[in-house]
Amino acid sequence: MGIRLGYQMPNFSYGDSVEKLFPTVIRQTRDAEAAGFDTAFVMDHFYQLPGLGAPDEPMLEAYTALGALATATSSIQLSTLVTGNTYRNPTLLAKAVTTLDVVSGGRAVLGIGAGWFELEHRQLGFEFGTFTERFERLDEALQIIVPMLHGERPTFSGKWYRTENAINEPRVRNDLPVMLGGGGERKTFALAARDAQHLNIICSPSELPRKIEALDARCAEAGRDRSTLETSFLAFVMIDENGDRARAQLKQVLRGQGLDPDALSDDEFRAATERMFVGTPDDVAADLKERVLDRGVDGLVINLPATGHVEGAVELAGRTLRPLVDA
């Protein structure tokens, strides 16, 4: 599998007509493929997220979009960061990602998490439940999905889900990889140690040493060799050959979150930008190496919230960051 350098598209608000929206998504994905990114990600949401935009900003259904991207690319892996388990029955999700794998010639990765965006659930009629219930459901779902991806026909009767000899055909392989996303040191990390090949760790960079230590512990408890579970970190990147332009991108992103960057105190500014990496290519590369890779994370997933849709931006990011993860 291998996710050493991933490119995530966090928004589809490109300022153009709807007719131009998906061609821009295709171009970004093709640019990522050409620039050395090994995986392209879309979000699995139906509304835009707080901090990225208003709920009614453009958002595409993930698996429909990924299926279309499969026909527009040839080598890049395709996934969500990450699928909300609460949005689909697990057998349907297994079928969707396996179909994506067939359509793409074996390039799908199942990214999955417990789900968290309450507004979507409430307004669209998905059951949200409690934090504990969502993780119970994720635990059960993985016990159904993983065997189905491996060509088995699970019969399962749990608190939330039931299957009977669940068939999943066709498949192009029996080892379609699973990636969990989240930062929960007990629940998420334990499920990753049990079922996943990859964990995308969601946290602030300063927390990474503790997260890696907790993941080591969960793998030891599961009797798993920690080196067999790959890790990555999602970083928000504002990069430009001109550092002042990159810092202007940062202010644009903060304003989009409803913040006034010029009115924030130093502590508030640091808190708001801890997962952001800003500056010239050399600045961004050095910062990601020091704050992420040198703390024990295997790979990077980045997004370009201000400029991803601008021609040349993805290529610059790939050219800058590929040497970091190949080192």
Image (spheres, helix red, strand yellow):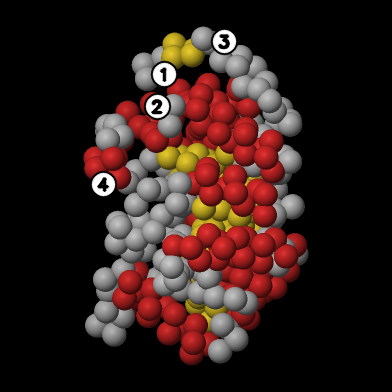
Task: Kindly report the distance in space between the C-alpha atoms of the residues bearing marks 4 and 1.
Answer: 24 Å
Residue 73 in the figure: left or right of residue 164? right
Nearer to us of marks 2 and 4 is 4
- Quickly name the residue at label 3: 165
Amino acid type, callout 3: Asn
- Quickly name the residue at label 2: 137
Residue 64 in the figure: left or right of residue 173? left
Task: Kindly report the distance in space between the C-alpha atoms of the residues bearing marks 2 and 1.
Answer: 8 Å
Task: Kindly report the distance in space between the C-alpha atoms of the residues bearing marks 4 and 3.
Answer: 35 Å
Q: Residue at x 50, y 39 (%)?
A: 112
Q: Is residue 11 visible?
A: yes
Q: Position of residue 261 (x, y in %)?
A: 31, 80
Instruction: Look at the image and tell me in which quarter the C terminus lies.
Output: bottom right
Q: Are marks 2 and 1 in contact (CB under 8 Å)?
A: yes
In this rendered view, identify the residue nearer to me: 298 or 278: 278
Q: Position of residue 252 (x, y in %)?
A: 38, 78
Task: Kindly report the distance in space between the C-alpha atoms of the residues bearing marks 3 and 1.
Answer: 13 Å
Dot 3 falls on a residue whose secondary structure is loop
Q: Position of residue 194 (x, y in %)?
A: 57, 29
| The image quarter in which residue 35 lies | bottom right
Q: Are marks 2 and 3 in contact (CB under 8 Å)?
A: no
Dot 2 falls on a residue whose secondary structure is helix
**Label located before the other in sequence (2 or 4):** 4
Dot 4 falls on a residue whose secondary structure is helix
Density class for disc 2 (Cα within 10 Å; few <14, some 14-19, many ≥20) is many
Task: Kindly report the distance in space between the C-alpha atoms of the residues bearing marks 2 and 4.
Answer: 19 Å
- Quickly name the residue at label 1: 161
- Residue 124 numbered tag: none
Residue 158, relative to residue 187: is it above or below?
above
Nearer to us of marks 2 and 3 is 3
- Quickly name the residue at label 4: 119
